[in-house]
Amino acid sequence: MAHYLVCYDIANPRRLGRVHRRVIKHALFIQFSVYYLQGTRQSVEALMDDLREVIDEGHDDIRIYAIKPLSGALHKGCSWLPEGIELFE
């Protein structure tokens, strides 16, 4: 399994909602427009295929970065996760 960071900038609020609803089927919400996906290259391609149906490629931007596991990630500030639940090992 590989680790990915999914980020997007969607120009239209209606498309933004559609993109969010599709991304959360594949990836874990981290913060606004940023998600964590642990999976295979095929799962990333499946996500991108799903998103192509709703975005406007002339105005919207979706990026998926291969990253190292989040066990070494740092976090400061408020978290959307309930107290006691950590994403990082």
Image (cartoon, rainbow, N blue to C red):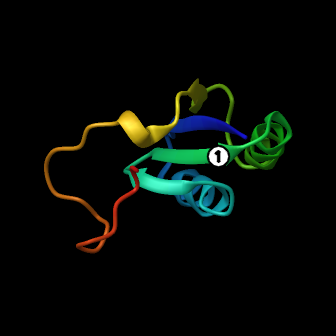
Judge by depth and name the residue closer to the eye, 55 or 86: 86
State which quadrant residue 83 falls in.
bottom left
Image coordinates of residue 57 in percent, x first then y, are 69, 29
Residue at the spot of label 1: 38
Dot 1, crowdedness within 10 Å: few (<14), some or many (≥20)? some
For the N terminus, the image quarter is top right
Quarter occupied by residue 87: bottom left
Residue plotted at (26% across, 37% down): 74
Query: Toward which corner of the image does residue 72 lie, by quadrant?
Result: top left
Q: Is residue 59 above or below residue 29?
A: above
Q: Whole-percent x and y of residue 3? A: 61, 37
Q: Secondary structure at mark 1?
A: strand
Name the residue furthest left: 77
Give the residue displayed 53% in from the left and 57% down from the top.
28
Residue drawn at 67 percent across, 59 percent down: 22
Along the viewing direction, whichever of 31 and 16 lies nearer the viewer = 31
